[in-house]
Amino acid sequence: MTKVRVRFAPSPTGPLHIGGVRTALYNYLFAKKHGGNFILRIEDTDQTRFVEGAEKYIEEALQWSGLNFDEGVTKGGKFAPYKQSERREIYKEYADVLIKNGWGYYAFDSAEELDKLRTEAEANKNIFTYGPSTRKNLKNSLTLSNTTVEKLISEGNAYVIRFKTPENEEILMTDIIRGDVKVNTSTLDDKVLFKSDGLPTYHLANVVDDHLMEISHVIRGEEWLPSLPLHYMLYRAFGWQNTMPQFAHLPLILKPTGNGKLSKRDGDKMGFPVFPINWNVPNTEEIFSGYREAGYLPEAFVNILAFLGWNPGDEREIMTLTELVEEFSLERVSKSGARFDPEKAKWYNHKHLQLKDNELLVSDFKALLSEKNIEVNDKLISEIIPLIKERANFIADFWENSHFFFIAPKQYDEKAVKKHWKPEIPELLNQVKEIINNSSNFTRDNLHDEVIKYIEKNEISVGKIMNALRLCIVGSPSGPDLFKIIELIGKKETINRIEIAIKTIIN
Ligand code: GLU
């Protein structure tokens, strides 16, 4: 195989939706799997759709996701510049080549003239297309004399350059995911390749850059499949067939219901993010929420995306980026749309949180505690994390699972009180309190053994004491190992909590 070079080529027309990040991810995985390069190219030739901040957002989102590119605007590279607006002279040159070799022509029809034709066609229940059957009657270099064309251009009349679609020809294409695709050119129109503003359209810039940047594989969303015949014809028109990249069009990401494409408004409507990181809509107060800010780990995020349209062919679901690189293949990407499941997304985060080294969670947990005005040492935090992590989907859940390590219960679970706070409990707990108070070895195991010894000696049921003691310490019937909590909160605090509970709980 020739050197693998793939590109992710977003247009900075807004924030990157998770579908876009998945395209970037599959490009990244494919490149890394084959020891190739992953390139970020910014396709900003449509200036009417330019959105402030979008380019920066794209880079930040890729960076957070761990998808580092080898060449790009901020990274440079052998084929720089990587931003199309900085390559404008190049495209004009290639548009001229097409005019010269007969694959392109100048068209002078004004927007009003074309609108009129469209309206007339609509009135006859037809659709107007500028193409093989209509171009012979329109204002272009195929119908006007050379002198007229030169005159119109030199007088500064606006023109576009269109692709001259061959008449009634079968275009045979191959897509790595979809197999062979066939299209008759009679269904196509003569796309504009070069606009009157002096900039190329997507089609021209995209093909020229893929060629010049020696792209070996074009991996992109399915919405670009209808453009493939034109791109094939452009490679032919330039005489670049032999080095044409291979194509792979990725399936859509569908709404959780499975009905239709996941749209950028779905997420906040249905309560889950569809963007990698928060996007503040420029000049408004509106914010689209992102996975980063919702508390997802980047490794979980890429795992979720990888499985939207691909799987390794076995039972594995939890995979790191390195494992994904090892296993990835375009042949295993499915043709059909992938339904997004927000609950499954949380599950992925839960699983990756469990895999994460506890020491790496300390600072996040500390920050969470700091928001509650709780300052504790790292050692205590490191001891608490393994006790509470299993019950958490997100780091933010740590608080709910751990507050009793830092503050005494303010209330007691009513149901548990009803069930476990029998009249004899205060008396029994006073004795347990004494055992704890007299314990000289304040460790989880020793405290446990001493209390159990007392229970056995007095023939009390274990549950009776444990449930009541847990109510005193935690306030509810849940939480991690009770004696570990006692060890960590310390003797004084434990005694205090038992005394307060005895005073306050009335059943
Ligand atoms: N600029 C196009 C986009 O915004 C790129 C499509 C392609 O990868 O060819 O998606």
Image: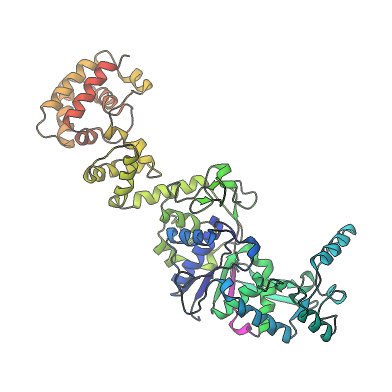
Using residue 421 as the reference point, say whether residue 29 is left or right of it: right
Using residue 419 as the reference point, say whether residue 348 is left or right of it: right
Q: Nearer the viewer, residue 283 or 329?
A: 283
Number of labelled discs?
0
113 shown above or below 285: below
Q: Nearer the viewer, residue 366 or 151?
A: 151
306 shown above or below 429: below
In the rendered image, residue 188 lying in the magenta stretch gets the answer no
Residue at the image position 29 percent from the left and 44 percent from the top: 385
308 shown above or below 3: above
In percent of width and height, residue 322 lies at 39, 64
Using residue 233 as the reference point, say whether residue 126 is left or right of it: right
Q: Which residues are magenta?
A: 239-252
Q: Is residue 245 visible?
A: no
Using residue 223 as the reference point, say whether residue 506 is left or right of it: left
In percent of width and height, residue 156 lies at 76, 77
Q: Quadrant of residue 137?
A: bottom right
Ligand 1's quadrant: bottom right
Q: Quadrant of residue 106?
A: bottom right
Image quadrant holding the C terminus, namely top left
470 shown above or below 68: above
Q: Is residue 290 visible?
A: yes
In percent of width and height, residue 269 lies at 58, 42
Residue at the image position 22 percent from the left and 23 percent from the top: 498
The residue at the far front in this view is 155
In percent of width and height, residue 307 lies at 50, 57
